Image: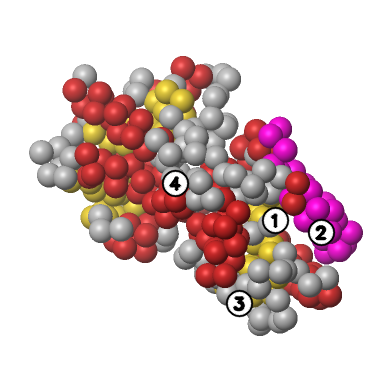
Amino acid sequence: MATVVLAGGGTAGHIEPALAVARQWMKNNPSDKCIFLGTKSGLENTLVPAAGFELRLIPKVAISRTPSASWLRIPFDLISSVVSSIKVVRKGDVLVGFGGYVSAPAYLAAALSRTPIVIHEANAKPGWANRLGALFTCHLAVAHPVEQGKFSDALLAGLPLRSDVATACVASASHWESARTAAKARLGFPADAPLVFIMGGSQGSLAINAVVAESVSTFNNKGISVLHSVGKLNALPPSKGGYKPVAYVDAMADAYLAADVIIARSGAVTCSEFRALGRYALFVPLPIGNGEQFVNAASLVADGRAEIITQKEFTAHFIEAQIDRLLKVAAQAPINGDDQDLDAAQKIVALTEFAIKS
């Protein structure tokens, strides 16, 4: 019986692919055990137990993007987190990391305890944690081709889809148009009105929310329905006309299927799930980081299924001037989704099995 330790906490972008791999592992190896590493402040505290997996908490190593006095604590926080991680990782047969704050101390713990490491990089530009982990392993997988560095030789696995998105992609394969109509009905929106689904990632976006708040009258005046995921930690505005705000969308597969246009950040998971089920997207990449969100959306733009706008350009005036055009372009976009990531979890499981044996 093998024990697989998975590290990928903080946001849904790190957690959902890890959960998909854990589910696939247990499907293939029902007598084995999967344990997740996380911190007390991440979404993993909700998502991992809900999926039926064990979660072990380690101290968070918070690194601000700009230099500050908090950087003086980093060495001490890192040592504490690595020590806590070793207690879990050394009992496992392999560590599978997906990036983010949880992964960095886990990689160091695995290197110190000589535990095999497998890394999956979801973004088109690898993050710092996974670049660190890659120093200790050759068992690498990516969702997108990477042109430079060690990840350029990685297994091109795709991005593991959450179970509801994968199920919907398979179920809709022979009847995409009726699947989209049925999803809109399940969400409670009229079939004869266009639907725009707006979200700012798993935690919401204050910048996107502010623009949407100024645009509610525009949407209502044009007869456009809106499903707006504002984020659990953000204030929930009132519903008005066809505008329906929610803290978090549980039925994500239906939201992707039902929407004529999706307005969202272009995180790796969002892009992958949109590719599987969505029709047309306006992406507003996060303006901080290493620019990975612009790169994540590039292939969808090239395929004619999306366009990109900067956060500075995304305004209420833009929505008023461009939403009709976006809906018109969306109506000409392919009705079908794309199943290219359906076997991504199985590919990573196979790589993990190879890492254990070697």
Q: Are marks 1 and 4 in contact (CB under 8 Å)?
A: no
Which badge, 4 or 2, is on the more N-terminal residue?
Answer: 4
Does the magenta segment cover residue 143? Answer: no
Q: Which residue is mark 1?
A: 261
SS for dot 3: loop
Residue at image coords 69%, 64%: 195
SS for dot 1: strand
Which badge, 4 or 3, is on the more N-terminal residue?
Answer: 4
User: For the residues marked 4 and 2, what is the alpha-carbon distance in whole angstroms?
Assistant: 30 Å
Q: Circle 4: is it few (<14), some (14-19), or many (20+) Cα within 10 Å? A: some
**Which one is in front in this view, the residue at disc 4 or the one at disc 2?**
4
Image position of 22 (left or right of 250): left
Q: Are marks 1 and 2 in contact (CB under 8 Å)?
A: yes
Q: Quadrant of residue 238?
A: bottom right
Residue at image coords 36%, 46%: 20
User: For the residues marked 3 and 1, what is the alpha-carbon distance in whole angstroms?
Assistant: 22 Å
User: For the residues marked 4 and 3, what is the alpha-carbon distance in whole angstroms?
Assistant: 34 Å
Stretch of the chain drawn in magenta: 302-330
Q: Are marks 4 and 2 in contact (CB under 8 Å)?
A: no
